[in-house]
Amino acid sequence: MERPEIDLRSASVARIFDYYLGGAHNFAVDRVLADAAAKLMPELPRMMQLHRRFLARAMRYLVEQGVTQFLDLGSGLPTAGGSAELARRLDPSSRVVLVDNDPAVIAHGTHMLDSANTAVVLGDICEPDLVLGHPETRRLLDFDQPVGLLLVGVLDFVGDVALPQVIARYRDAAAPGSHIVLTNFSVEGGLEDYQRTEQLYRDNTTIDFHPRSAAEVTELLAGFDLAEPGVVDISLWRPEAVEDLDEHPERSAAYVAVGRKP
Amino acid sequence: MTGWTRQDIPRARSAVTEPVAAGMEAFAQSWASAIIGTSYVPMTKAEVVEHLRGLTELLVEALLADTFRTSAAHEVGIRLVEAHFTGTETLDRTVQLMGDELLSELGRDGEPHLRSRIAALQGSLSAGYAQSLRERTLDEQEAIREAVLDARDHAEAALRASEARFRAVFAEAAIGMGISDTDGNILEVNQSLQDMLGYPASELRQRNLRSLMHPADAESVWGYYEQLLHGERDHFRVEKRFNRRDGQAVWTHLTISLVRDDDGQPAYQVAMVEDVTDRHLLQNRLRYQALHDPLTTLPNRALFLERLSKAFDGAAGTRIGLCYLDLDGFKVINDSLGHDIGDQLLVAVANRLDESVAGDGRLVARMGGDEFVILIEGSTGTQSIVDIADRVLDSLTAPVRIDGHELSVSASIGLVEREINGTTSADLMRDSDITLYWAKADGKSRWALYDPERNAREVARFTLSATMPAALERDEFYVDYQPLVRLEDSKVLGVEALVRWQHPEFGRLAPDRFIELAEETGLIVPLGRWVLRSACQQARRWMDEFGDATPFVSVNLAVRQSRDPALVNDVKSILEEFALPPHLLQLELTESAIMGTADEPLEALRQLSGMGVRIAIDDFGTGYSNLAYLKHLPVHELKIAGSFMEGMRAADGADPVDSKIVSTLVSLAHALGLTVTAEGVETPSQAERLRKIGCDAGQGWLFARPGPPHQIEVLF
């Protein structure tokens, strides 16, 4: 994996995400870009919150299915409502491995997390063999037992790779009963502002934005049995409260799904 | 889930009455509705309500306490932030809701002292919220900054380690390495390169790559370099010589690579230099050994062949000469004086050859054993190569002194000289080898010049001898007969069988074309047996037809045949096969076949003679005849050679010497009881003289030319 640049002057997805969630793990450069994007797409901060809410619902579902170990691929900063915190709340014995390609995320996680049940791994999720073979991954996760593969808020930034094959590699490594939790921004809802947002990201960061259609998302889930209600808008996957709902769920801002490896 | 609700907050239970509890619940619900969504909080709505219920309780207890204190509201502000209610709108709505609804929900609307307490609690809550949010923000800022700096330090440390490793690789590499800018100015060199070239880094850094050009460099080296400079080539690898500072040569494998910048423009040149001097010297030595004769140090066969084939690269019309030389009688020296002397002789000869012919375009090589060859490139004609051959023979005339022996040595040389076009190295080698053989056959200690006609003849001879066995099987041979006529009355006494070869390619061949060959190859024995059998068969036919008038058949017996142990049995079985009386067969042998032989062939002749077979001496008078011995031989007839007839040709003025000789021979033969036949009788006067001399019979064109049986038998 190529070593990412550590540059305080450029924005980071993880920090922008934190900013949208009301955190202070961010810098002026992040906030400027986040504010500009939010101006183009006022629903962005809300979308981020919806992602966290979906993550919480999906992880609770997984724990109910007996999954207590998680591989969070593209975790972002492990702040409030992140997978590590959620897992600890849902089952104190659960174990979580966070994978991110942002060295700052890794450094932050190393400082903040209890290493007994959590680990942070610097890696590119598109290199499954490196991620799966990482000593920390092997230390915490037992691949003979079901694993929760979390791909939340990350595939939006992954393109130009054979993603179905990458996901299949993770699927093949996981024991039957393992689950996948997946989100991906969509353009099918007619969010014309996406293109401008995309442009904004491209102009200001090295971040590429890759929204996907429902069909493409479904293709990524090959080999998994989809939990009800299948591939749906982020606010329609087993909503529990009004605040889980998008103001305009019919616009399908992002597709989500949870699947089980038979 | 109640993870965010502290259970240990002290409660003033006395203040909580039924209506108050209901009011608190209503407020907590309103509060939750007001602030949910103002911040991202990782809680469900129920959890939020539960959390706010606790906080409402704190607020209400403080509000209704006997002794009013605001510290609880401060705590509430802190705990809102702790639950991640970090949005400023949360505080806004909370303060607003406290003012608008708390007292009315509790049913204490009209109490002014409570309203002022509310204001105090609002202030305290805001202060606690602000303080907590500020601390949280500072903490998080601190945390993320630390994380990013950590990550950066980590990356930089990794980079430094990586750079240090690369620097170590460069500095410590056993291979010489150097970096120069795009103009070839040397920027960095490692220790190995300094050691290899013998220059300190400080001196090399002041030089340009071009200054390391060596006069012996192949043109391609600097051609590649130019291409590299222009970015047309990314790297090249050559074998190149450098001069060390001390003047010694270093042979290297040099690889120069172009390093480009991010935009693809040439930025640096990196040279990697491997010292291969030892290998190079070893290769040179091995090559020298592979191409030179260890004894004489002359070029060997391999080098000669290499040079010979290169000589054919010359322009059309270029001439080339070869002297193929072989010492005469070297084997005798080797056998009698030992190999050590033989070897020293070869060394001496090699030196003389080298001295006498050495020069531009001339290569003296030892081909093996006592064979040497001189290659003359760009020769100017036959004379030039003959001159060289003469010089070589000259150089060998003085005896060679070795260990007290004075050895006389001579050589035979085959010479070939011609234009390179139209010939090949293989042709040259073969022709010079053949010519050497001629020089030997012609008497040694001489040169022979290649002669295409002689070669053609020899080739034809070879072809004949090679095809003869098959010809015998295919019945390409046949027999003509020539009568032997009694001079007295012209009666045909006998017929000589003369073998002919109807060659499919060369036509009818007389015996002189192939009998000698057959003698050399040994085929004369089966061929002679075949002629004998054919003649006997023919004689039997004539006997059946002419009875007592049948002449004998006279068959030539070659020297080898006469020494063939199976001769007697062969003759016997053939006579028996055709039931031919032995007196109808005469065998003709040359003087040398009879005279020069040991006892066994003579014994065979005696047996044949004893059987009744006639024995004649052919070509009598041409060899060295031991007349005294003649009387001990089982011979019946002498055939006088045709050469004596020359002098008896003319009717008058005949050579008295020839006549005298013939006369003497006839007298001698008759004295020994032998009959005499003269060969080569061509004129009536010859026949008349012979008859007068008393010669018994004649053979020759006068009587009949050789011919097939039906032409001959009319004379019987």
Image (cartoon, coloured by chain):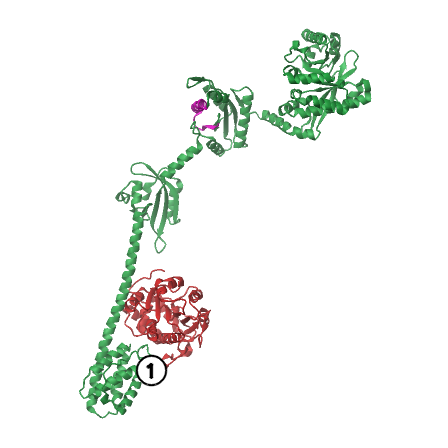
Magenta highlight on residue B351: yes
Report x, y in % for residue B96. Answer: 26, 85
**Camera sees residue B398:** no
Q: Nearer the viewer, residue A87 or B265?
A: A87
User: Which residue corresponds to mark 1?
Assistant: B46
Q: Is residue A91 above or below residue B688?
A: below
Quarter of the figure with the N terminus of chain B: bottom left
**B254 left or right of B509 in image:** left
**Residue B284 is drawn in which quadrant?**
top left
Q: Could you say which is closer to the camera, residue A227 or residue B436?
A: A227
Chain in red, by letter, is A
Drawn side of residue B162 relative to residue A239, left or right: left
A246 falls in the magenta region? no
Marked residue chain, label 1: B
Give coordinates of residue B53: x percent, y percent: 28, 84
Q: Amino acid at mark 1?
A: Ala
Density class for disc 1 (Cα within 10 Å; few <14, some 14-19, many ≥20) is: some
Say left or right for B652 vs B3.
Answer: right
Q: What is the x, y in percent for residue B578? A: 77, 24
Indicate the secondary structure of the residue bearing disc 1: helix
Which residue sits furthest bottom? B110
Decide if residue B608 is in sight here.
yes
Main SS class of the magenta portion in the image: helix
Which quarter of the rendered picture does the C terminus of chain B lie within? top right
Q: Colour of chain B?
A: green
Q: Is residue B304 above or below residue B676?
A: below
Residue B142 picture location, percent across and down? 24, 69
The one of B642 and A229 positioned closer to us in this rendering:
A229
Q: Which quadrant of the figure has residue B15?
A: bottom left
Range of residues picked out in magenta: B339-368
